[in-house]
Amino acid sequence: MTSRSRLLALALAFPAFTASAEFAVAISPPRFELEAKAGDVLRQTMEITNGSAQAAALSLKTADWTYEPDGGVNFKEELTPGSCRPWVTIERRQLTVTAGKPYRYRFEVAPPPGTPPMECRFAILVEGQQESTNAGGLVVPFNARLAVIVYVGIGGVQPELSIVGTAVQAVDGRQAPVLRVRNTGLAHGRLDGFLTGTDANNTPLDFVARGYPILPGETRVIPLNATRQGDVDAPVTLTFPVTVKGKLEWGKKQSQDFEQRFVQ
């Protein structure tokens, strides 16, 4: 059973619990995107902060992960085929972080000499156990978890993204333009750039590609989030057709001009 499945099973077994202790741990940065050379040792530090009044007892470990089509992440503690976690060393597996005193936690990645160009991906899981009480007064353990995702590009690998399709789909309960993006490179990529457009009412809009990672060999649906020009906080309900144009960017100075009419 995956880590995600275990947490889901706990939630289904005790659906009415409320936390009796506060879990207020934060980690910075929440994600690492790094580069390394085969045979070198890459050393990094993340800062763990406890915002509660009580000391936080934490356990830390590495995990492999998969990224699901719906945007969910499955963590796997057992080594998966091709895992680079044997190259990873973490500072310690048990840690207590007191309130108001951030802890600088270290880890290393050492790709062996001769490693071919590739992207090493893993997670560092930070877990704290609390006692929680459900509606019937039963005290059960509840694991709070944070995951720091680490990407390490070895040998200068880059993403190679291309738009292979467009559509209109329901996103967060509303119809939105989406892109189907394929990555034929050796590293993950994220679409960026500046897009503008209008809907059927000639409403001037800005569009931003949602920042989902597109992993090597993967084709993923990327929604375009719309905001009103000059009022980014106003809710937007698009009236189709919608025309979007501008420039999409990814990786290191890679870009593509884009213009598309989306019809519902």
Image (tube, grey):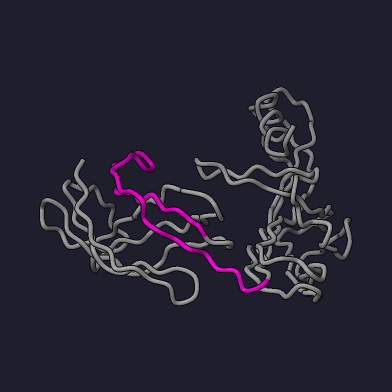
Question: x%, y% of residue 139?
Answer: 79, 30
Q: Is 203 displayed left or right of 13 in the figure?
A: left
Residue 58 on the magenta segment: no
In the image, which residues are magenta?
155-184
Residue 105 visible at all? no
**Along the viewing direction, whichever of 98 and 218 lies nearer the viewer:** 218
> In the picture, residue 86 is in which quadrant?
bottom right
**How many numbered tags mark residues here?**
0
Q: Quadrant of residue 99?
A: bottom right
Residue that appears at 50% across and 57% down: 184
Residue 67 visible in this rendered orientation of the protein: yes
Residue drawn 76% across the image and 57% down it: 84
Left or right: 255 in relation to 52: left
Looking at the image, residue 130 sits to the left or right of residue 117; the answer is right
Q: Where is residue 15 in the image (x, y as percent from the top left)?
A: 64, 27
User: Is residue 183 shown in magenta?
Assistant: yes
Relative depth, front residue between 58 and 244: 244
Quarter of the N terminus within the rendering: top right
Q: Quadrant of the C terminus?
A: top left
Residue at 49% across, 75% down: 252
How far across and how far down the image is residue 118, in percent?
Answer: 66, 63
Say which of 120 and 61 sits in front. 120
Q: Residue 7 lies in what quarter of the image? A: top right
Does 155 appear above or below 56? below
Residue at the farthest left position = 201
Depicted 199 relative to depicted 48: above or below: above
Residue drawn where x is 76% and y is 66% of the image: 115
User: Which residue is more in the foreground, 23 or 108?
Assistant: 108
The reply, left or right, for residue 120 in relation to residue 165 is: right
User: x%, y% of residue 181?
Assistant: 41, 53
What secondary structure characterizes most of the magenta part? strand
